[in-house]
Amino acid sequence: MKSFASRYLLLVAFSLLLGACQSTPPAATEATGARATAIAQLEKNLASSELATAEDQLAALQAESPNDQALEQYQRQLAEAYLRRSQIVLQKGDVNAAATALSRARALMPKAPALTGGVNNAIVDARKAELDRAEAALMAAEAKPQANVIDPTAESTTVALNLTDMTKLRRQLDAIAADVVNYQCDVSIQAPRTQDYPWLATLLTKRVKKLDADFDLNLEKQILRNIPAQMVLSPRKP
């Protein structure tokens, strides 16, 4: 009888031990579920190109499990996504956004600089092209004679005409014609009377053609009864 009881107690103890080995603690189960959810959200944000959010999620996962090699694939995917973004925005001409995305790709895969080399060279070339264009524009602006009547930085300049003094009017038209040619201006002739337009247009056209016979003078006629005669000069946009 004593032998049977001993065997029974041994069997019960073995069963309890086996059950303890096979059961998973609730805390471990919750941690595993939270990790799976976090990884699923990370994959979703990678797929939808929510890269900043994905980067934050990856950093949180890596902080929890710094030695988890399984996270390396997501780090590489994120780096490659940033690299693709850099290429796309560079093609659209946004050099600054391309450089920002490239810097994130480099930070995520510092051991693989060759992968970012091509985009980096393209950004360097684009920045050089921007500087070259800016320098050319500056040189062109410096090469132009000083403006007589217009503000070269304004969208348009209105010049009131002195119709009562022909000497002064001729000087005005000389100055206007020089600015029209030098700053590639379109001209709107605004006058209170219909008969004012033809002779004002003729006087200005003769002066412009004398300065540059090939200049494409664009004149607009506006009859405005309640204003004195004037010309509106609008430099053409590059």
Image (tube, grey):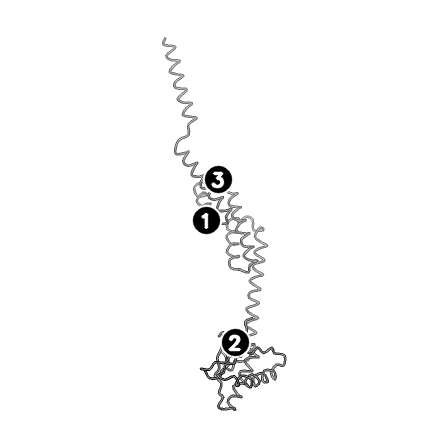
| Circle nearer the N terminus (3, 2) | 3
Compared with 52, 92 (above or below) is: below
Q: Position of residue 7 (x, y in %)?
A: 40, 13
Q: Position of residue 108 (x, y in %)?
A: 51, 49
Q: Residue at x 42, y 30 (%)?
A: 24
- The amino acid marked with disc number 3 is Asp
In the rendered image, the quadrant that contains the C terminus is bottom right
Q: Quadrant of residue 21?
A: top left
Element assignment for label 1: helix
| Circle nearer the N terminus (1, 3) | 1
Write down the residue under mark 1. Answer: 53
Element assignment for label 3: loop
Write down the residue under mark 2. Answer: 234
Q: Residue at x 40, y 25 (%)?
A: 20
| Circle nearer the N terminus (1, 2) | 1
Element assignment for label 2: strand
Between 110 and 188, the one lying in front of the other is: 188
